[in-house]
Amino acid sequence: MKKTLTLLFALIAMSLTAQHTISGTFSPAKEYTWLIAYQLKPGTQVYVADTKIEDGKFKLELPANAAAGTYRLVYAVPQEEFNFDVLYNGKEDIVLNFNAQDGATYATSTENKIVNSYFLEINALQKQVIDFYTSNSTNKKELAKIYNKINSTQAKYEADAKDLIALNFIKANKPYVASSFESIYEFVEHKKQNYFSAIDFKNEQLQASSFLTDKTLNYVYTSLPLNKITKDATETVLQQNIQTVASKLEGVNDTFKFSLFYDLWIYAASAKYNKTSDFIYSNYLKEIGAVTNNQELIKGIEAHTRLRIGAKAPEITWNDGKNSLSKLDAAENYVVVFWSSTCSHCLKELPQLNKAIQQYSNIKVLAVGLEDEYNYWDTESAKLKSFTHALALGKWDSKYAELYNISATPTYFILDKDKRIVNKPETYKEVLEYLNKK
């Protein structure tokens, strides 16, 4: 009897710590070679495992103690772009098939099957509402029928997902349904007002996923007036939307707050909503970044801001401050190039630029040497007679390497006559291509 009980307890212990797998296929097979899994946590992610994808097939073994939650599978670089999320409940193996067109579909996994099915159905129904309004239909019975279907579908999936992780996402995604017929303007306004009604920003399952980020980005950057407005007016609305998001984040941990605001900043910066990206930084990221020890990301934001297209080029001085970028003689354009006399690539490109630039009568080149010592720079810079030269000792640790965020040489900036940055070419040929278009 004792042996039987010992064996029973051992089997129970094994079942409690059993390893589960995520396996399946990627197609077309030749395009995929490796898979990395991260566990998502509020505002961050933690490496879990990785495996080869061979002939389009993979099998990823999760650690026995892998916690239930959302896992991100990365299949290419950049990681931020080539990934998808899966729900893991700690109780089941997951088998999936992935292709870039359809994303992931699941052969086995209760959690992921129900989430996928829910979003397919509910998104299709919401599209019917949009189609109803864009067709200028006034058939109230038709719209009421769609709304009834949305309500019944939502209720069905909430019931089916009881006790599943999936329920967190299904409940939080509950769509706005009007209680009576509305004009398109009323519908859009009320949908915006109720956008976050079902979402609990303190829910850690939602925080540890892409759900809240995707929903928030969608709210901020698509909840705009139906009528066409100017860019300045658009940015005013965007900032109002961000303030609404901030009010929903009261009491939420700073790590998640920073991550969410950083994603909002990235979108604004990439879309060239400069006033909005500056608003996010000055009102939220700067303070939260200090609290959460995200100084490197803050430095990156500040570098982007001072070096973005349209920004006034940061001042550069040399010869003990007697000469400066701001005091250079007037020109149609300026080229600022950061180089080093010990950089073989620089020694190949800069002589060619030096020769080519002589045909331009109204272009000035400022070459900033990032150097460890004076000797080599003195010899090589003397060969580049068409340039104005400045020396920055300390190389990568020099003031101007940091100010201009230089990580490689040569690095080029083209400025307009007011010394505002207008282009950041990668090679001297791209410098000339830009100048030839002028």
Image (cartoon, rainbow, N blue to C red):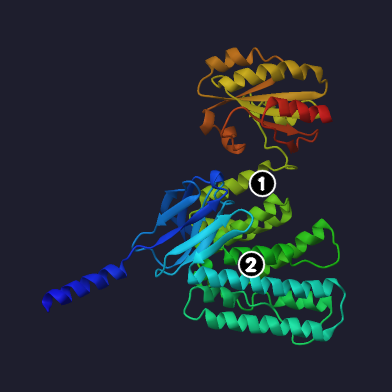
Q: Position of residue 93 (x, y in %)?
A: 42, 65
Q: Is residue 232 left or right of residue 317?
A: right
Seen as rendered, the residue at the extreme left is: 2
In the picture, residue 128 is in which quadrant? bottom right
Q: How far apart, in angstroms, are the residues tagged by discs 2 and 1?
A: 26 Å
Q: Position of residue 140 (x, y in %)?
A: 83, 85
> Which label sits in the foreground, 2 or 1?
2
Q: Amino acid at mark 2?
A: Lys
In the picture, residue 276 is in which quadrant? bottom right
Q: Residues within 10 Å of mark 1 (few under 14, many from 20)?
A: some
Q: Are marks 2 and 1 in contact (CB under 8 Å)?
A: no
Q: Is residue 54 left or right of residue 274?
A: left
Q: Is residue 75 above or below residue 433?
A: below
Q: Is residue 354 left or right of residue 2?
A: right
Q: Position of residue 182 (x, y in %)?
A: 81, 82
Q: Is residue 331 left or right of residue 18?
A: right
Q: Which mark is residue 215?
A: 2
Q: Amino acid at mark 1?
A: Thr
Q: Which mark is residue 305?
A: 1
In which quadrant of the rendered image does the N terminus lie?
Answer: bottom left
Q: Residue at x 62, y 58 (%)?
A: 102
User: Residue 156 versus residue 291: which sits nearer the camera?
Assistant: 156
Q: Residue at x 79, y 82 (%)?
A: 143
